[in-house]
Amino acid sequence: MKRSDLTSKISLSKFRVGRFVLNEYEVREMIARVAEGTLNPEGIVIVDEDGNSATIYSDGRTSRNLSGFDKGGNLSLRKIRANRLKLKNEKK
């Protein structure tokens, strides 16, 4: 078996929040904490790899879409679509 048989390399997008560099999952966790009310969003600015910046609203929304913020979500959606197709084919 080769490494490429298992999965292609997935590199997570990086985001800068102040002096910290966070990956997509860490940024999503931070946004979830803001939405829960356990983290104050005041002064938090997220900068993506393209240099676009966004602020976080108190309900967890961001002021703009960030580049690369959908990699993890796309992988999950791909799995859901595959499972739906499999179920549909089994019912035939």
Image (tube, rainbow, N blue to C red):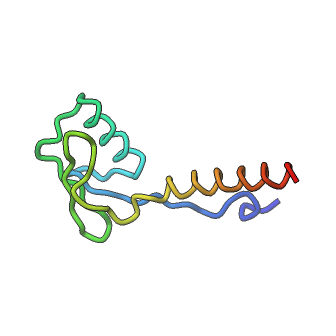
Residue furthest out toward the top = 38
| Side (left or right) of 33 relative to 25 | left
In the rendering, at what x and y percent does residue 50 appear? 30, 71
Between residues 21 and 82, which one lies in front from this camera angle?
82
- Seen in the picture, residue 13 relative to 38 is either above or below; the reply is below
The image position of residue 9, as x and y in percent, is 60, 62
| Residue in view at x 26 percent, y 56 percent | 16
Query: Measuring 21% from the left and 48% from the top, which residue is drawn there?
Result: 56
- Name the outermost residue toward the front: 92
The image position of residue 38, as x and y in percent, is 24, 28
Callout count: 0
| 17 relative to 6 in the view: left or right | left
Tell me: residue 53, above or below residue 88: below
Q: Nearer the viewer, residue 12 or 40?
A: 40
Q: Position of residue 92 (x, y in %)?
A: 88, 54
- Which residue reaches farthest bottom? 50
Of residues 87 and 22, the one nearer the viewer is: 87
Quarter where residue 34 is shown: top left
Task: Judge by depth and name the residue closer to the eye, 17 or 91.
Answer: 91
Q: Quadrant of the N terminus?
A: bottom right
User: Which residue appears at 83% of the width and 55% of the height?
Assistant: 89
- 20 lies above or below 70: above
Q: Is residue 42 left or right of residue 24?
A: left
